[in-house]
Amino acid sequence: MNSIESIGSSPDICRFTRAEWSGMDGRVGRAAADRRASASAGARVRKRHGRHYTPVRLAEFLAERLLEHVVPQGRLRILDPACGDGELLLAVYRAAVRRFPGIPVQLTGFDLDAAAVALARERAAGLPVTWRVGDFLCAAEELAESSFDAVITNPPYVRTQQLGGATARLLSVRFGLRGRIDLTHPFVASVPRLLRPGGVLGLLCANRFLTTKAGANLRALLRADLTPVELYDLGDTKLFDAAVLPAVTVAVRASLATPCRYVSAYEIPDGESAETLDLFTALAAARECSLRHEGRHIAIEAGTLDPGTAAPLEDSVEFAVPVLSDSGPIVRPADVATPWRMSRPSVDEWLRRVRGGTWRTFGEVARIRVGIKTTADRVFISDRWEHRPSPPEPELLFDLITHHDLVPWRISRERPTRVLYPYDVSCSRRTPVDLDGFPCAAAYLAEHKDVLAARAYLTASGREWFEIWVPQRPHLWRHPKLVFPDISVAPRFALDRSGAIVNGDCYWISVPDIGSETLAYLLMGVANSALGLRFYDAVCGNRLYAARRRWITQYVARLPVPDPSTAAADALVRGVRAVVEEGAAPDPGELDEWVAAAFGLGSAQLGDEFSSPA
């Protein structure tokens, strides 16, 4: 266990009045800006250790929302278990002395980074703070239960790959975590025991926990001994210098029946905005509007949190929507595997109607696979093979589809990108070729053996040094397949009949897995429609910067499929076939009418605010 060294404290609780603190803060805040930058060890180290210090205004917003739910009991004890340079504790102190005048405030900050803690101590000189350098996850076991009224934190975000497998396994066992973990999970797992009953957690972390499989741990932790009361998905507001999409969660250590407020902020195409509100003012008010923030057009949406419900076993289609009975809503246990989503009455009603017309989901119809991942693209992938003096044998060079080649409905390859694919494509299992039969390929790979053999994770799995990491099922490449990019603003599902291999920046569904091209056309019609996009946003919701979305297996698997035996579905299939086979330009409005009819919806039920992305 790491030792915990107390390097500073002050018993002089609430020494400063509101006026004195406000005046001092202006000087400290300006002087600290340069010191915060110099205290950092550089972008690479920050990423490795998950250090992304909190911007001042965001710290103030989190502090204000946290204190909205705090009821002091004679004094206010606040902990930051990963305090960095102290920004969150400074912000919560300022807010607390304004909100609760005369209430003593005691602050405690932990961090492994001695330099950061030294800076925090300097910034908060004279304030009632106990600073501790050391490993909070070890120290937490020694802290008394119910030691704090509130915890405010931006814990380090360090993924399993950076933690290392052994450390990740130890943390998983110790904190009861499953699957992929990051360092945020054990930090949050330590909090409920330290909060008194009714105590409040204010958590700032990456928003990916809302929708990803890896976020299931955090979703479970936030609903086990805590009740979320406010949630803010701050999306692509670019509040951090790093490429971080943040979320703020406020949760209370209590069982509450009150719905959790859910507010989101994402950039939308530029346009006029009548609002002059500050971003954080609009978020706190949960006011649906669009506004300008640092030169960008941001849309604010508001609703309540739907944490997902476990569908009954006989129900083959699982949606994260409320279930109603004649006596009112039926409360089902939360399904932590289901992404969290924003619930709004109009959207929930629309989802119920879509569910009524759903036959299967994409994931139930066929397996969705990621493309190949070589882990050495510069060796295996090129658009200049013919310029080499002795290129690998053509039998091992295959056309490669990347995200650049995809438009809705069809493949549009602009570059002759090919991949060296050292496998027997007649085999259903990964079967590497005998390089003795391909001397040119063998010589080429030998030139790069140092790079390829250094991939210890590959050779440790029993593979040959010249193999690729994810080859998929080689024999399926020659069959027709649906292909779509991992990241795209709008859906771009296309049919490929060329036999090309699919790169790892795309996903694919083999038509033989689907069962027929007819059903493939049906899936493609739904996916490329306005209904498919609206369903994605309502149920999956993993948006990135500038309106881009992640089209990965766990989300695409949830897209709905209408009954293919109906006349309306047949009309949709015929329309998509004409688009694909005859190269006709699709009419977006007509496509959306076909899709809506296939699900038994009227055109008005598609949603006036949604237009086709095709």
Image (cartoon, grey):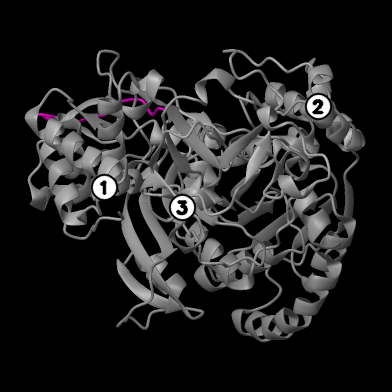
Where residue 117 appears, as percent x and y from the top left, is 83, 60
Q: Nearer the viewer, mark 2 or mark 3?
A: 2
Mark 2 or mark 3, which has the lower sequence index?
A: 2
Residue 198: in sight, yes or no? no
Question: SS at mark 2?
Answer: loop
Residue of label 1: 529
Give the spatial CA distance, label 1 vs label 2. Answer: 42 Å
Viewer-proximal residue among 149 and 243? 243
- Decide whether the magenta segment is chiefly helix, strand or loop: loop
Crowdedness of circle 2 by 10 Å Cα count: few (<14), some, many (20+)?
many
Quadrant containing the C terminus is bottom left
Give the spatial CA distance, label 1 vs label 3. Answer: 14 Å
Mark 1 or mark 3, which has the lower sequence index?
A: 3
Residue under the image location 64 percent in, 26 percent down: 471
Crowdedness of circle 3 by 10 Å Cα count: few (<14), some, many (20+)?
some
**Quarter where residue 366 is shown:** top left
The residue type indicated by label 3 comes to Ser
Question: SS at mark 1?
Answer: loop
Q: Is residue 477 above or below residue 33?
A: above
Where residue 543 appears, as percent x and y from the top left, is 45, 52
**Quarter where residue 513 is shown:** top left
Magenta residue span: 325-336
Q: Does residue 587 appear to the left or right of 491 in the view shown?
A: left
Crowdedness of circle 1 by 10 Å Cα count: few (<14), some, many (20+)?
many
Where residue 13 appears, as percent x and y from the top left, is 71, 65
Residue of label 3: 488
Mark 1 or mark 2, which has the lower sequence index?
A: 2
Q: Is residue 466 above or below residue 110?
A: above
Give the spatial CA distance, label 2 vs label 3. Answer: 32 Å
Where residue 236 appears, as percent x and y from the top left, is 50, 62
Q: Check residue 466 in the rendering and tell me which mark sits there, or answer none.
A: 2
Viewer-proximal residue among 229 and 473? 473
